[in-house]
Amino acid sequence: MLMFAAALAVAASALAAGLLDVSYRPLAGKEPVNLKERYAGQVLLVVNTASKCGYTSQYEGLEALNRKYAGQGFAVLGFPSNDFKGQEPGSEAEIQEFCTLTYGVKFPMFEKVAVTGAGATPLYKSLAQATGVAPGWNFHKYLISRDGRVVANFPSKVEPDDPALVAAIQRELKAPRAAE
């Protein structure tokens, strides 16, 4: 039993080490960004977004979270997706314009991706594997610790200012940085 637990711990560590070792282009950008290199040591909230969804107004709350905690080593990372009823039909330039002009989004937004099924991008496949939960709709949130582990996930209906989500972010921000 102890060996089984140790094997699980090693597998979880390996997954954590590789979870963010993926690259995506910034929304409407040209040069891919390696998430592990760019966001190492930060607490991250990874969110699949859509511009024509009942939860789209969450952009405002996500931007407020990003603004409030950015100075403490936190970032919201948005990934537009058209996986749910075609609620993100626009081009990347259109998505960027909508997010900026309508909600004042300044947190990092990345290229439009698939987040579910066989076509899911490697990041979202890893997030689903780590939690056992793939996004069921737009604005599903995954909280990633400073050492690259998924420590919580929140369904779409959980608003960015929800006390449980905010408490989880604050808990992770207080956690010591892992030794490199």
Image (tube, grey):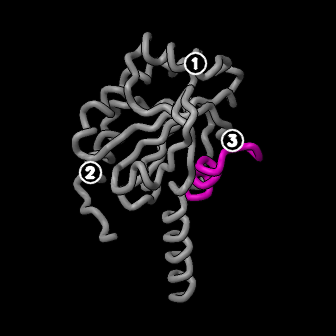
- Labels 1 and 2: the sequence-earlier one: 1
Between 55 and 30, which is closer to the camera in this rendering? 30
Residue 121 magenta: yes
C-alpha separation, residue under disc 1 versus residue under disc 3: 23 Å
Between 92 and 170, which is closer to the camera in this rendering? 92
Residue 123 magenta: yes
Quarter location, residue 86 = top right
Give the dominant element type of the magenta stretch: helix, strand or loop.
Answer: helix
| Residue 34 coordinates in the image, percent (x, y) | 51, 50
* Mark 2, residue position: 173
Q: Which residue: 31% across, 67% down?
A: 178
Apparent side of residue 180 relative to residue 32 in the rendered image (left or right): left
* Mark 1, residue position: 93
Apparent side of residue 60 relative to residue 142 in the rendered image (left or right): left
Between 20 and 49, which is closer to the camera in this rendering? 20
Apparent side of residue 73 relative to residue 29 in the rendered image (left or right): left
- Secondary structure of residue under mark 1: helix
C-alpha separation, residue under disc 3 versus residue under disc 2: 29 Å
- Labels 1 and 3: the sequence-earlier one: 1
Note whether 128 is above or below 70 in the view shown.
Answer: below
Note whether 165 is above or below 90 in the view shown.
Answer: below
State the extent of the magenta-drawn residues as a range: 117-130
Label 1: few (<14), some or many (≥20) within 10 Å? few
